[in-house]
Image (spheres, rainbow, N blue to C red):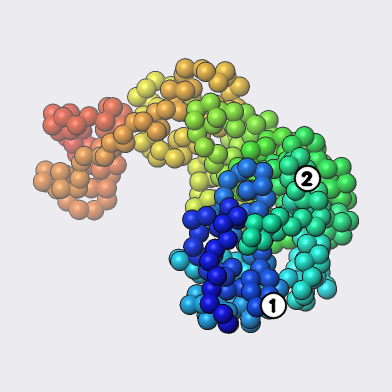
Amino acid sequence: MSAPTTSPPRNPLLDGRPGLVQVLDALDRDGEEARIVGGAVRDWLIGRGLRADIDIATTATPDEVMRRARAAGLKPIPTGIEHGTVTIVAQGEPYEVTTLREDVETDGRRARVVFGRSWAHDAARRDFTMNALYLTRAGDLIDLVGGAADAAAGRVRFIGDPDRRIREDYLRILRLFRFHAAYGRGSFDAAALAAAIRNREGLARLSRERVRAELMKLLVAPRAAPTLADMQGAGLLELVLGRAGAVETFARLVEVETALGRGPDAVRRLGALALRQGPDGERDALALREELRLSNAEAARLAAMAGPAPTPAMCEKGQKAFVYRMGREAFEDRALIAFARSRAPLDDAGWRALAALAAGWPLPEFPLRAADFLARGLLPGPALGAALKHAEEAWIEAGFPIGEDALATIVQASLKVAR
């Protein structure tokens, strides 16, 4: 193999990425081609900036990709080699490299593929036109399906027959809505939406983990609120959540987050969308844990959102007690969702102060310890635990005092309860 070439100056995605240059230098030569493909090209083309993750398509077989990577001193990892994908680590950065493919058999969840050398066939097997864009090492845009025009217009359109694309992988129904929320402008592509509705029963065939991954990305997309309303109208949102979603509350939460300078939070937004108020909300949280295969942390956070919410009508001492007992994150989740449900003006001073409390108030630490009670003659055991519990509640009710006299009074009162 001849010596590596220097990086071409015209490809903007190569700027500041010496690892990417090394990967392309190894693969785009000696009878094989390699091109940057998909999201990185799309986002650069429409001015969304340069993505951190870069995918590469190549005519080289996976074995040849592995061989060339090693010969160039790079680290190849066979992350999905049966489907043609090798991850190459260069300069500490991973690059996903996939051999050109054609689907020969699909079942709505996975495909059996054969490797090929046709860029047109590789483009035709992808989902949306805006995702089938290639950029050569020299910086030439290769658009075989009209994806550049669709990306510029904010039009999420399937490649070829929408029904066929969906039946190859029913997850593409959710990807349609997710990409519309992230990149779409105006109304849905009519053919794409109609096909999604026709094939909606296929959602039941998907793994819950894949559904969760797509939904969580959709929830934080720029146009999530109107897109979820369209999903609800099409009868698809209930199939994902297990019940109708509170789309109006979700949309209002987005407005609240924006007004308060909060970034989008997928778990909080899921709570606003899918949890009812009161005891029903706790049942909803449990159901969502199973329906979406949520992580333990996500499920616990949702469950914490289901309880009573703080309101501006509470006194400041009560609000601070709420924060202390629940924790900062749970308080903020409940406060922001309650603000959204209240329909109060976005500049309402009371709700804004409540939301600011969680972020701005330094949580105090309970200053009493078991030693404070043992020193006064209380023996280890249940009585000690009862005394500590009573003392902490009394300390909260007193407004979190730190003075010695106030704490001594609390200890004495708690000793009487324990004895």
- On the image, the x and y values in percent for residue 128 come to 77, 53
* Callout 1 touching callout 2 (CB < 8 Å): no
Q: Residue at x 13, y 32 (%)?
A: 404
Q: In the visual, does 32 lie left or right of 232?
A: left
Query: Residue at 58% across / 61% down in the picture?
Result: 8
Looking at this view, is 337 or 51 the one in front? Answer: 51
Residue 36 falls left or right of residue 265: right
Which is more toward the observer, 25 or 119?
Answer: 25
Q: Looking at the picture, which amino acid does disc 1 mark?
A: Gly
Q: Nearer the viewer, mark 1 or mark 2?
A: 1
Question: Residue 229: which quarter of the image?
Answer: top right
Residue position marked by numbered label 1 in the rendering: 31
Secondary structure at numbered mark 2: helix
100 with respect to 349 (left or right): right
Name the quarter where the C terminus is drawn: top left
Asked whether the viewer can see residue 134, the reply is yes
Residue shown at 55% from the left, 70% from the top: 5
For badge 2, the amino acid type reads Ala
Dot 1: what SS? loop
Q: Residue 133, percent across and down?
A: 72, 56
Crowd class of label 1 (few under 14; some 14 to 19; many from 20; radius 10 Å): few
- Which picture quadrant has residue 210? bottom right
Give the Cα separation between the discs numbered 1 and 2: 31 Å
Q: Which mark is residue 149?
A: 2
Q: Which mark is residue 158?
A: none
Pick the front one: 9 or 326 = 9
Question: Where's residue 200, x and y in %?
Answer: 82, 52
